[in-house]
Image: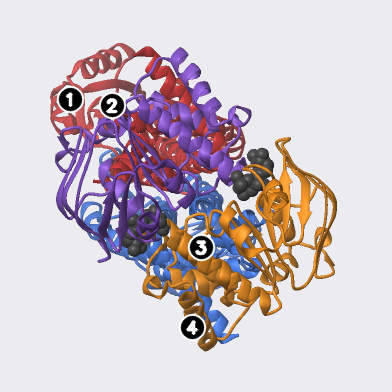
Chain colours: A red, B blue, C purple, D orange
Amino acid sequence: MLSTLTFFISESFISLRRNGLMTMVAVGTITVSLCIFGFFLLSIINMSNIVSNLGTKVDLVAYASQPLTDTEAENVRLQISRIDGVKEAKWISKDKAWKDFKEEFSDRLKLEEIVDSNPLPDTFFVKMLNPELSAKVSKEIARISLIEEVGFNPNLVDKIETLVEAFRIGGLMLVFLLSLATLLIVVNTIRLTVLARETEIVIMRLVGATRSFIRWPFIIEGIILGMLGSGISIVIIKFTYEAIIVRLQNALPFVTLFTNHFWIGCVYFLVAIVGVLLGMLGGYISVNKQLKEEN
Amino acid sequence: MLSTLTFFISESFISLRRNGLMTMVAVGTITVSLCIFGFFLLSIINMSNIVSNLGTKVDLVAYASQPLTDTEAENVRLQISRIDGVKEAKWISKDKAWKDFKEEFSDRLKLEEIVDSNPLPDTFFVKMLNPELSAKVSKEIARISLIEEVGFNPNLVDKIETLVEAFRIGGLMLVFLLSLATLLIVVNTIRLTVLARETEIVIMRLVGATRSFIRWPFIIEGIILGMLGSGISIVIIKFTYEAIIVRLQNALPFVTLFTNHFWIGCVYFLVAIVGVLLGMLGGYISVNKQLKEEN
Amino acid sequence: MIQLIGVTKTYPNGVGALYDINLHVGKEEFMFIVGPSGAGKTTLLRMLYKEESPTMGEVIVDRVKVNNLTAEQVPYLRRNIGVVFQDYKLLPKRTVYENVAFALQVTGTPHFQVRRRVMQALELVALLRKANSFPDELSGGEKQRTCIARAIVNNPPILLADEPTGSLDPTTSWDIIQLLDKINKRNTTVLVATHNKSIVDGMKKRVVALEGGRMIRDQQLGAYSGERLSNA
Amino acid sequence: MIQLIGVTKTYPNGVGALYDINLHVGKEEFMFIVGPSGAGKTTLLRMLYKEESPTMGEVIVDRVKVNNLTAEQVPYLRRNIGVVFQDYKLLPKRTVYENVAFALQVTGTPHFQVRRRVMQALELVALLRKANSFPDELSGGEKQRTCIARAIVNNPPILLADEPTGSLDPTTSWDIIQLLDKINKRNTTVLVATHNKSIVDGMKKRVVALEGGRMIRDQQLGAYSGERLSNA
Ligand SMILES: Nc1ncnc2c1ncn2[C@@H]1O[C@H](COP(=O)(O)OP(=O)(O)OP(=O)(O)O)[C@@H](O)[C@H]1O
Ligand SMILES: Nc1ncnc2c1ncn2[C@@H]1O[C@H](COP(=O)(O)OP(=O)(O)OP(=O)(O)O)[C@@H](O)[C@H]1O
Ligand SMILES: [Mg+2]
Ligand SMILES: [Mg+2]
């Protein structure tokens, strides 16, 4: 059994080497397809990341009904954070809020000329774990004493959030379609290499080879092609992505690019898996098609 | 001459028909590549479109030093719009500005309780033709009498604009890289079909065919493959895009998708051109490679 | 060993290649099939290892009805039939050694046996020197001898040789036929389709003649052309 | 017409195929090249239409030094040399008609002439019936005759035939050789590499014998084997 496997594997390598040009062309095509796939994955991740960072991180805003002492504020903050579905709550003191506000609108509003006292209340920014619970949570917050009113986040942020959601769904769909496209290209490429070796398959059958005897080396070849292709594309993606990150971080410092090593590792892993799977599937589908044609 | 051309064209069609499976596989691959290319183009266009629509259309904001009459305001507006580099200027009366402001911040500010009179000045929103001239234009506006202060647009919008710019540049680069990738895939596909017909080319040479005699039918074949591939992908892109537009417009009514028929037509045209060019180039490159190998 | 009952073959393009062939070949026979170009010799041999199936009639090899074999069973039939193909059918990307070894490898022959038996077969056809050459690097006769080595390497009970001396000089041709005869003496059924008049005449074996797809002669101790035999 | 001066050929894999061949063939000659399998007959012919180039020595065809031809000039050399290849070399996706027509089309022959001349050539080799068959659908002999038709269709001044009767029965073989002889009488130089003893002996033409890449005999009115001639 083991010797048969060794035989198949060595067969695959011999045939890859002897069909040198064809092997190179096939690996090239697979590499290109996987590069497109990988870059696309990274782009989708980054864009939804950027778009989410554009909006403030606040889902709900609660206003106090009267000026609060530090203790009172901390108390309210704790009460809010304990509500189910809330991720965190942050207290912005009346004074800080007024200072921020004046800073942001200094060129537009001449408030100080007319308003002496601070018109803003103490404010709590609330971040949700699950934004869908916002309505329920906002009611609960409103019930806390010392809280006068709860508002949702501003309009623009709202839009952006919906957009991010659309982005995620659309991105997933696109990744799916792109996987399909990559599969098609790889299957086609391998099918062409098998087609070119039609004579070989026919002769093998004529001298008494069973289908699986012919099939296995082709499948292993597919796997090797897929491994080579995904290996090369991972290297290409890695270096290009790192170069892009450095450059983009300098040009657009406020945009935070995705650099979490775990998730990027996952992308590479996915590319590798897809490559190998595609190669295997491609080898199987195409040699099978060829074998089916006789009899 | 004409009869030779007819001969080459009929040769190409015969060979495409007789290599039926291979033709189908090649057209399939080209179609898939061009579909990716086309969808990508449309996505880039749409995303930069959406992202620009997120920001307000305002580049500069000018505040009046005192309440203006309608005539004065119109006068100032005209002065501003005549400055080099300004696309348009819009007057927001003091009253309208105050109303808008109160509406937007009603839940956060208790202004009415403290402020009776309107603290906001008359405001002019200025849209630039060329945002890079902003600094110069802002100085010129400041020199107009009745104008007290000129500000740049708010921070968020600023960020978005930079992002849109990055999007455009990055998008162009990606389109370029993707064209290259598509080229590679198509060339590889056609090269594989030529490789499979190596024997044929060798025999043709042996019975006295010149290189160009062999080359032309292959190039024409490439063009036909490209035409078939781009034709099919345009149909696929068109129907899918229209289906997506309808669905997305319903789901995200505030997002304006790109439906300008002229520009979408341009995308289709580009896909067609790229397809045909790729086919031709692919045919040429691969048969040439094959012909070069002898002697 | 081999039986054809009312076998008729029409190719998919409408060409009739064989009409109502009835033939019985015994276990230890050595038989020549002769006839002009296009007579149906190759077609007849193709039926036996199911490269083609008869349009009508029955083909029986070693008591098995070939028509009824499934695609999964065909390889096992073919392993019992060594075939020297008229157009050699060598694997283009494999050396002479590998081409011959392939016929053993498909049957799962252990590695150490493969080497010994391939070398033996190559020696019989005088091709040891070319063991590591690819088919592209061989002369016509060398290709043909490679094909012969592959057909005999696993000692099949049936050996079909389609024009096995077409690219060989008279001396080598005669050597090859002597080799087939020796193999036949070791209990192998041998069928040879050939145009080589001097060999057929020299061997004095059973001769079946085809013409236009019909069997026109079946003689023990026959010669290439019927007339000449009657003269002799 | 054809001249080889000190031609030596070693293939890239180190196999020596020809050693110091000196040969002159006149414009109206009909010459046989004989020798055992692997002697170098095919290699010698390949030099003449530049499928291979000699490692050493000079090949001159029709006063042109073949070695010096550029890749652009080679097709014009080949159009003057009809070749019957030992392995046929038919275009697999083209019919018999198209295969023969191709040799005319490459020279830009007008359409109406192509049809007439192809039909004529196919008639000479008795293949009119198979004009629309693909090579896969032909018997061995039919493939060989297609190749012969292609070689003669544009009346080349030189005709090389490598084992042109290997897949043909004796009668057809003889017909083909008579055809080549007729073509030779119309001022065509004809070189035939063959193993067919009875044909060589029957024709009584010039015979050049190769063995192991060396020219061992060059006889006018020769026979297949030298010894036998001395007997005769
Ligand atoms: N695959 C095929 N499809 C269609 N017709 C075929 C096919 N193979 C052979 N034929 C036709 O069937 C007839 C018999 O062919 P076959 O190959 O059996 O002849 P043969 O006796 O072997 O001739 P040769 O001596 O020339 O090899 C011929 O007319 C041939 O053209
Ligand atoms: N392309 C090649 N590469 C390497 N060696 C070759 C090549 N072609 C032929 N040879 C070798 O050169 C020698 C002469 O071959 P050639 O084909 O000329 O013989 P031949 O006289 O035509 O024989 P046959 O009668 O069998 O056709 C042989 O030993 C052969 O193995
Ligand atoms: Mg035959
Ligand atoms: Mg030869």
Chain letter behind tag 1: A
Q: Quadrant of residue A65?
A: top left
**Which mark, by number, is residue D115?**
4
Question: Does residue B12 lie above or below D220 as drawn?
Answer: below
Q: Which residue is at 29% across, 23% downward?
A: A67
Quarter holding the N terminus of chain A is: top left
Tell me what residue is drawn at x 78 percent, y 62 percent. Answer: D70
Given this view, does label 4 or label 2 mark the residue nearer the observer? 4
**Letter of the chain that mark 3 sits on in the rendering:** D
The kind of residue on which mark 1 rests is: Ile
Mark number displayed over residue D173 = 3
Q: Earlier in the sequence, mark 3 or mark 4?
A: 4
Question: Label 2's element?
Answer: strand
Secondary structure type for disc 1: helix
Image quarter of residue A267 = top left
Give the amino acid type for the residue marked by disc 2 in the picture: Val
Q: Which residue was labeled with disc 2?
A: A126
Which residue is most to the bottom?
Answer: D112
Dot label at residue A141: 1
Camera-nearest label, 1 or 3 = 3
The residue nearer to you, when weighing A75 against D33, is D33
Crowding around mark 4 (Cα neighbors within 10 Å: few <14, some 14 to 19, many 20+) is some
